[in-house]
Image (spheres, rainbow, N blue to C red):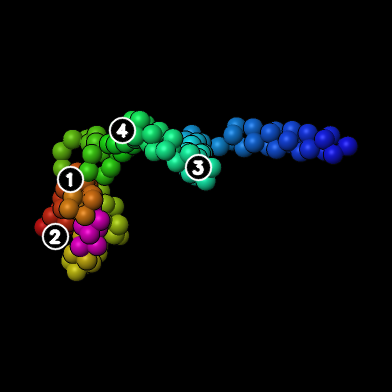
């Protein structure tokens, strides 16, 4: 009877896992797989060390370490960042309108010059390339400020 209950529990967990897998996003699945592989590797290394086979763990690390390091570096470089992201195409080509400038700075039309300067300063803290932002976004914020202060 115990084996039947354990089998039913395993089946229930398997079906629940399949349903969660079906509804999960690709990024969450990739993240989960990364954690599973990392924890599996750490568990295996700990098992080898605790059973007196630490030399085998060290040998495996020497053999697979460069491969793991290279894959990690490739994944890190493939990940898009704000500075490497391509700017969206300009809708009309030309300069931005005053309405667009107000939208970029997050202000309502008719804002004072002090409000415009404060919004520009606030946005440039995160949009500036030195702060991890992109050149395109910083130029849009600067263009919006220049148009509204004319």
Q: State which quadrant residue 122 falls in.
A: bottom left
Of the 4 image quadrants, the one containing the C terminus is bottom left
Which comes sooner in the sequence, label 3 or label 1? 3
Which comes sooner in the sequence, label 3 or label 2? 3
Span of residues in magenta: 121-127
Q: Nearer the viewer, mark 3 or mark 1?
A: 3
Q: Nearer the viewer, residue 64 or 127?
A: 64
Q: Which residue is mark 4?
A: 66
Element carrying mark 3: loop
Which comes sooner in the sequence, label 1 or label 4? 4
Q: State which quadrant residue 88 falls in.
A: top left
Q: Residue at x 25, y 56 (%)?
A: 126
In the rendering, which numbered label is found on residue 52? 3
Q: Residues within 10 Å of mark 1 (few under 14, many from 20)?
A: some
Farthest residue in the bottom direction?
114
Look at the numbered discs 2 and 4 and tell me whether their residues touch, using CB distance below 8 Å.
no
Q: Which residue is mark 2?
A: 149
Which comes sooner in the sequence, label 2 or label 1? 1
Look at the numbered discs 3 and 2 and tell me whether their residues touch, using CB distance below 8 Å.
no
Q: Residues within 10 Å of mark 3 (few under 14, many from 20)?
A: few
Q: Nearer the viewer, residue 35 or 101?
A: 35
Which comes sooner in the sequence, label 4 or label 3? 3
Element carrying mark 2: helix
In the image, residue 121 above or below residue 67: below
Q: Nearer the viewer, mark 2 or mark 4?
A: 4
């Amino acid at each position: 009877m115990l084996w039947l209950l354990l089998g039913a529990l395993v089946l229930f967990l398997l079906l629940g896992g399949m349903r969660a897998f079906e509804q999960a996003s690709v990024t969450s699945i990739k993240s989960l797989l990364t954690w599973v592989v990392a924890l599996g590797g750490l568990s295996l290394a700990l098992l080898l060390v605790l059973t007196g086979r630490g030399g085998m763990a060290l040998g495996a690390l020497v053999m697979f370490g460069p491969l793991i390091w290279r894959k990690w570096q490739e994944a890190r470089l493939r990940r898009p960042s704000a500075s490497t992201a391509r700017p969206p195409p300009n809708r009309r080509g030309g300069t931005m309108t005053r309405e667009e400038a107000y939208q970029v700075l997050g202000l309502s039309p008719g804002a004072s010059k002090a409000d415009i300067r404060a919004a520009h300063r606030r946005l440039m803290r995160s949009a500036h390339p030195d702060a991890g932002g992109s050149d395109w976004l910083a130029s849009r914020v600067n263009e919006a400020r220049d148009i509204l202060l004319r």
